[in-house]
Image: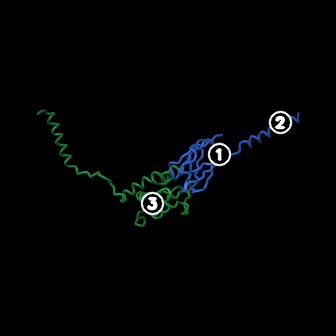
């Protein structure tokens, strides 16, 4: 047997051993995330946020969106917000003016579905780096 | 000679008055309906204003970040109108904060 053939056979054997040592990958049939999981809600919420909220709140949710310079006070830094989920959900739903805050925060209830509004709250909670105690849940 | 000068001065003043009255600032109307502006492009003159009228059953929020004119008319519901005037020439891209697909251009000229 030539040296080249020996190398080929050795390589194939090594690949076979390596492949057999790998864990079985999870099935990719169907959805990877259950629809009602927090992770799925976070993902959907990030999509909603990216489409509707980034103009003011910014892609990093730090209140530095491209339109932020129009407002005083500036849009909220959602990463540092100390508001609980109920409050955030309400301001998303009925807008800033109805909560004695900025009139430039629109009411989203006519534009977003109930699920979208819930999802965006879950997403905002997931990126919040302030005190995430049980009160915030 | 003096009489002639007075005549010319008076005539000049009359021409100025007529010229000023020929172009008075105008108000243009843009309707928001079906999540769209009624026009994609609007040509106006410096000093003109544009009234944005919401004929949709939900809220709009018209704003612009253009250098020639930055503004935000705030959230306004059905039947409500908001007006903005333009005091500088340029191309102004107008958007809706609630509906990112809504866009139009206001071209302001001298």
Location of mark 3 (residue): A114
Residue A104 lies, in percent from the top left, at 55, 56
Location of mark 1 (residue): B87
Q: CA distance from mark 1 to mark 2?
A: 33 Å
Q: CA distance from mark 2 to mark 3?
A: 73 Å
Is B91 displayed left or right of B47 in the figure?
A: left
Q: Which mark is residue A49?
A: none
**In this view of the protein, can residue A29 be seen by the observer?**
yes
Residue B83 lies, in percent from the top left, at 63, 51
Is B48 displayed left or right of B63 in the figure?
A: right
- Output the chain of dot 1: B
The answer as to whether the residues below labels 1 and 3 share one chain is no
Q: Nearer the viewer, residue B48 or A82?
A: B48
Quarter of image, res A127 = bottom left
Q: Colour of chain A?
A: green
**Which element type, helix, strand or loop, lies under badge 1?**
loop
Foreground disc of the pair 2, 3:
3
Contact, mark 2 vs mark 3 (Cβ under 8 Å): no
- Output the chain of dot 3: A
Of pointers 1 and 2, the one earlier in the residue sequence: 2
Contact, mark 1 vs mark 2 (Cβ under 8 Å): no
**In this view of the protein, can residue A128 be seen by the observer?**
no
Q: Which mark is residue B8?
A: 2
Instruction: Report crowding for label 2: few under 14, some 14 to 19, many 20 or more residues within 10 A (C-alpha).
Output: few
Foreground disc of the pair 1, 3:
3
Q: Quadrant of the C terminus of chain B?
A: top right
Is A19 displayed left or right of B18 in the figure?
A: left
* Residue drawn at (73%, 42%) of the image: B22
**Which element type, helix, strand or loop, lies under badge 2?**
helix
């Amino acid at each position: 047997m030539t040296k080249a053939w020996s190398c080929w056979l050795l390589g194939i054997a090594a690949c076979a051993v390596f492949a057999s040592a790998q864990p079985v990958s999870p099935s990719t049939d169907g959805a990877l995330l259950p629809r009602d999981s927090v992770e799925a809600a976070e993902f959907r919420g990030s999509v909603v946020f990216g489409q509707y909220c980034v103009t003011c709140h910014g892609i990093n949710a730090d209140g530095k969106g491209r339109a932020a310079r129009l407002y005083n006070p500036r849009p909220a830094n959602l990463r540092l917000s100390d508001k609980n989920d109920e409050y955030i959900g309400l301001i998303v739903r009925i807008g800033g003016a109805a909560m004695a805050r900025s009139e430039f925060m629109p009411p989203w209830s006519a534009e977003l579905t109930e699920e979208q509004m819930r999802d965006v709250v879950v997403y905002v909670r997931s990126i919040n780096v302030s005190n995430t105690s049980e009160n915030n849940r | 000679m003096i009489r002639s000068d007075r005549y010319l001065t008076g005539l000049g003043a009359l021409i100025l008055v007529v010229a000023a009255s020929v172009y008075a600032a105008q108000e243009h109307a843009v309707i928001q309906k079906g999540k769209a502006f009624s026009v994609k492009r609007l040509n106006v003159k410096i000093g003109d204003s544009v009234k944005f009228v919401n004929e949709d059953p939900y809220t709009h929020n018209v704003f612009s970040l253009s250098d020639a004119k930055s503004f935000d008319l705030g959230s306004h519901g059905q039947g409500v109108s908001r007006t903005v005037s333009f005091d500088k020439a340029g191309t102004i891209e107008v958007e809706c904060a609630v509906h990112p697909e809504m866009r139009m251009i206001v071209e302001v000229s001298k």
